[in-house]
Image (tube, rainbow, N blue to C red):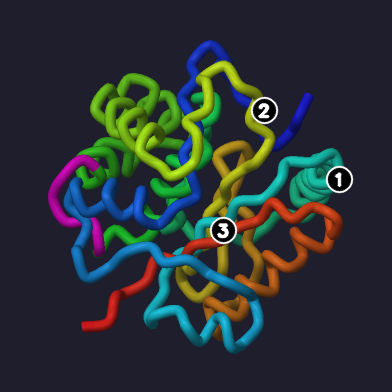
């Protein structure tokens, strides 16, 4: 069993989203998010590459391979975090993923829900208003019945640059989101039972790049990684 895609109700499946800023920007701008903000590619994690990203940047969506090495790390990490309780801000919004292959949309929801000042009116505001007082698991179940989100996801998954996969295809790559809440960096993954607090944030892009490089170091022979940042476009 692949831990990174362990879901409660596998009978509900979506077509995986592509890690593509153009696709995600169409989603968010068609559904109420401020046009001055959008997703941009991150071309590297060194200072020169990070300097190309517009500021401020408030979320990063990271795609990585859900390999046995990652699954082994996550299992041990969650056991450790269960024993050594984290300090999690009450302002962090976490959704549990209960829909197969929906980790891309979950990462998008985590990025926006923890930057709700960007959302405006539209689909995402309605989702966040409806789920604000829910627990993570209840939020996940709410999404199962959100037909409008399912339609948006379907249309977007079929509009990328790569071949649209079959809904029954095995999906091993996995999306997570990183956000800053109350001065700490959080890793938000719908497949995890809780947010992961990575500690104090001094420079969001540089600090998150350090975390993503740790992911890569666990599987140094795998090249299937990508990252995009939610940032304010230049005026």
Q: Is 41 included in the stretch rendered in magenta?
A: no
Residue 208: quadrant of the picture: bottom right
Q: Element type at marker 3?
A: loop
Q: Is 121 included in the stretch rendered in magenta?
A: yes
Q: Can you say whether 213 is above or below 106 in the image?
A: below
User: In what quadrant of the picture does the C terminus appear?
Assistant: bottom left
**x, y percent for residue 226:** 60, 58
Q: Can you say whether 141 is above or below 222 in the image?
A: above
Q: Residue at x 48, y 69 (%)?
A: 180
**x, y percent for residue 30:** 19, 48
Q: Element type at marker 1?
A: helix
- Magenta segment main secondary structure: loop
Label ID, residue 69? 1
Q: Element type at marker 2?
A: loop
User: In what quadrant of the picture does the N terminus appear?
Assistant: top right
Q: Is residue 68 left or right of residue 114?
A: right
Q: Residue at x 25, y 63 (%)?
A: 118
**Which residue was labeled with disc 3?**
88
| Distance between mark 2 and mark 3 Cα atoms | 23 Å
**Which residue was labeled with disc 2?**
6
Residue 83 visible in image = no
The numbered mark, 1 or 2, whose residue comes first in the sequence reads 2
Q: Can you say whether 192 is above or below 215 in the image?
A: above
Q: Is residue 76 left or right of residue 201?
A: right
Q: Can you say whether 167 is above or below 187 in the image?
A: above
Residue 76: quadrant of the picture: top right
- Asked if marks 3 and 1 touch (Cβ < 8 Å), the reply is no
For the residue pair 15 and 190, the one nearer the viewer reads as 15
Q: Which residues are magenta?
A: 118-123
């Amino acid at each position: 069993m692949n831990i990174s895609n362990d879901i409660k109700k596998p009978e509900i499946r979506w077509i995986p989203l592509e890690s593509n800023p153009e696709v995600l920007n169409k989603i968010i701008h068609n559904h109420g998010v401020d046009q001055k903000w959008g997703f941009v590619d991150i071309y590297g994690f060194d200072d020169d590459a990070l300097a190309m990203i517009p500021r401020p940047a408030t979320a990063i969506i990271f795609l990585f391979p859900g390999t046995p090495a990652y699954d082994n790390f996550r299992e041990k990490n969650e056991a450790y975090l269960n024993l050594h309780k984290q300090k999690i801000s009450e302002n962090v919004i976490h959704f549990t993923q209960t829909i197969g292959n929906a980790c891309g949309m979950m990462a998008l929801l985590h990025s926006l829900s923890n930057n709700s000042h960007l959302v405006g009116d539209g689909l995402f505001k309605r989702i966040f208003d409806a789920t604000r007082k829910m627990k993570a698991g209840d939020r996940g179940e709410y999404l199962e019945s959100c037909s409008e989100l399912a339609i948006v996801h379907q249309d977007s998954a079929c509009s990328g640059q790569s071949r649209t996969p079959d809904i029954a295809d095995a999906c091993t790559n996995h999306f997570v989101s990183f956000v800053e809440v109350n001065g700490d960096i959080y890793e938000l993954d719908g497949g995890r039972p809780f947010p992961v607090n990575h500690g104090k944030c001094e420079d969001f892009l540089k600090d998150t790049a350090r975390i993503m490089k740790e992911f890569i170091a666990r599987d140094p022979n795998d090249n299937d990684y990508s990252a995009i940042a939610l940032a304010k476009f230049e005026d």
